[in-house]
Image (spheres, rainbow, N blue to C red):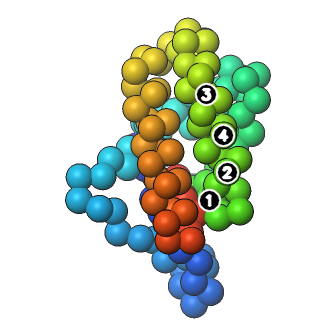
Amino acid sequence: MSLDIAVWVPDDDAHAGRVVVADPPGTSTAVGAESFRHQLWGSAAARRLGATILPQLADITVENRGNLQVPPDRLDAFEQECALLAENVGHLSAATGHDADGILRYLATMRHAVTRARAVGGGVVIW
């Protein structure tokens, strides 16, 4: 399995209170292998850098449906966290053993999803 990011819009009548927005053709949604929940996004290195949103992926359980939902009012904080990790990609790569270019690609995918979410007044979900 792999982790993917999607854009959603609030809808009280929909499952989980949201409707997932279709991705534009050619849009990348991959943000890492399933193991990245713990090995990268939830790593001690990411936490030491100050990440607080992405590390929640490591706390995902069956009970909370296996996804990380970032609501519209938290998009700024999420984007700032992505920027922080990108600025420190060398440290993150060295500490986790994951390729810096790959990490940057995943972070760019996340930031692109934030841009799309803002355009529709929605949020993002990683599952």
Residue, x 67% and y 51% (percent of image)? 76
What residue type is disc 4 on? Gln
- Circles 2 and 4 in contact, beta carbons < 8 Å: yes
Mark 3 or mark 2: name the one nearer the start of the chain. 2
Mark 2 residue crowding within 10 angstroms, few (<14) / some (14–19) / many (20+)? few
Mark 1 or mark 2, whichever is nearer to me: 2
Q: Left or right of 11: which side holds 56?
A: right
Mark 1 residue crowding within 10 angstroms, few (<14) / some (14–19) / many (20+)? some
> Quarter-wise, where is residue 14 in the image?
bottom right
What residue type is disc 2 on? Asp
Outermost top residue: 94
Between the residue at mark 1 and the residue at mark 3, the CA separation in whole angstroms equals 19 Å
Q: Which residue is mark 1?
A: 69
Q: Position of residue 16 (x, y in %)?
A: 59, 76
Mark 3 or mark 4: name the one nearer the start of the chain. 4
Between the residue at mark 1 and the residue at mark 4, the CA separation in whole angstroms equals 16 Å
Q: Which residue is mark 3?
A: 85
Between the residue at mark 3 and the residue at mark 4, the CA separation in whole angstroms equals 9 Å
Q: Which residue is mark 2?
A: 76
- Circles 3 and 4 in contact, beta carbons < 8 Å: no
Mark 1 or mark 3, whichever is nearer to me: 3
- Circles 1 and 4 in contact, beta carbons < 8 Å: no
Residue 3 seen in the current view = no
Report the front residue among 109 and 61: 109
Residue, x 57% and y 90% (percent of image)? 13
Q: Which mark is residue 2?
A: none
Q: Which residue is mark 4?
A: 80
Answer above or below: position of 41 versus 91.
below
Mark 3 residue crowding within 10 angstroms, few (<14) / some (14–19) / many (20+)? many
